[in-house]
Amino acid sequence: MSEVTRSLLQRWGASFRRGADFDSWGQLVEAIDEYQILARHLQKEAQAQHNNSEFTEEQKKTIGKIATCLELRSAALQSTQSQEEFKLEDLKKLEPILKNILTYNKEFPFDVQPVPLRRILAPGEEENLEFEEDEEEGGAGAGSPDSFPARVPGTLLPRLPSEPGLTSLTIRIEKIGLKDAGQCIDPYITVSVKDLNGIDLTPVQDTPVASRKEDTYVHFNVDIELQKHVEKLTKGAAIFFEFKHYKPKKRFTSTKCFAFMEMDEIKAGPIVIELYKKPTDFKRKKLQLLTKKPLYLHLHQTLHKE
């Protein structure tokens, strides 16, 4: 084993243990970040074409399967569903396999397949790709954990079934004000509902690509149906709106800015909310306004109650 490979395996092992430790301590946001970073590194190695790799094709396949399991555990931590989760004790079975990948020759313990390497930027990676952006646009920063390929179709969900005494919320995203609105390629908005720890309370939804761009506005005119009744949202929850656009030179979709709406702002009628610099701060602790100019996200809320 070369020193390079030995060092690589040590780094992977340390990252795996960090994620599992965070997971076992209940620090879910940190665990998710660590799992996603390691999964991306493993995917990259599993699909590397260079000839100086010490890993065989079979070992690369196993590395890719471990990356898949890390993604499954990460998804389980963000899911509100309890059934069929990939559990921590399952994940821990993979640590010795990763450590001894060069000699491991048994059947993989889980029925999974390697997933294709996607342009998903793990937290901290986007800062190396975006340094040329000017400060007002967001400057250097870590992207949100979710950066998607270009031309993402909308993933909007239908309104919840009505329940007596409970309120459902429709948010119409009308437009967003940006100084360089006309230059944004395939812009869309990712909508999520997070608790104070940044954990998803509802499924994440993406709007279709914006309907038009005009002057300093990107127009959407699309309805988002909140996937939880207002009365069932936990104290301190917030609805996040991440504005994303495609960067052809770098061939990935980047988060440009974000906005959020807290529970006391849920009221019928129009509302404008401020835009903040990336990275998306789901815990709302280190917020920086995107610009001093009067540019906002324009929404309209409709409350439905039986």
Image: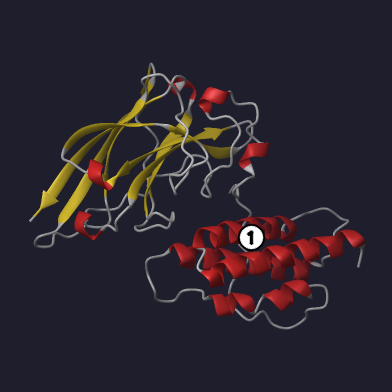
**Which residue is painted at 63% across and 31% down in the image?**
249
Classify residue 125 by image quadrant.
top right
Horizontal placement of 120 versus 302: left or right?
Answer: right
The answer to whether any part of residue 218 appears in the image is no
Check the picture and name the quadrant holding the C terminus. bottom left
- View extreme (front): residue: 285
Q: Residue furthest top?
A: 215
In percent of width and height, residue 275 lies at: 40, 31
The colour scheme used here is: secondary structure
Residue 230 lies left or right of residue 216; in this view the side is left
Q: Position of residue 96 (x, y in %)?
A: 73, 78
**Amino acid type assigned to the residue bearing label 1 in the image:** Ala
Q: Quadrant of the N terminus?
A: bottom right
Query: Percent from the top left, x then y, of residue 86?
Result: 51, 74
Depth check: 92 or 291 in front? 291
| Residue nearest the observer in this picture, 112 or 104 | 104
Quarter-of-image position of residue 93: bottom right
Q: State whether residue 180 appears in this view.
A: yes
* Number of marks in picture: 1
Q: Give the answer, above or below, for where 221 lies relative to 38.
A: above
Farthest right residue in view = 2
Tag 1 secondary structure: helix
**What x and y, as percent, mark residue 160?**
21, 57
| Residue found at x 51% / y 49% | 146
> Are there few (<14), some (14-19), or many (20+) residues within 10 Å of tag 1?
many
Q: Picture quarter containing residue 110?
A: bottom right
The residue that disc 1 covers is 39
Image height check: is 133 above or below 241?
A: above
Residue at left offset 33%, top offset 52%: 237
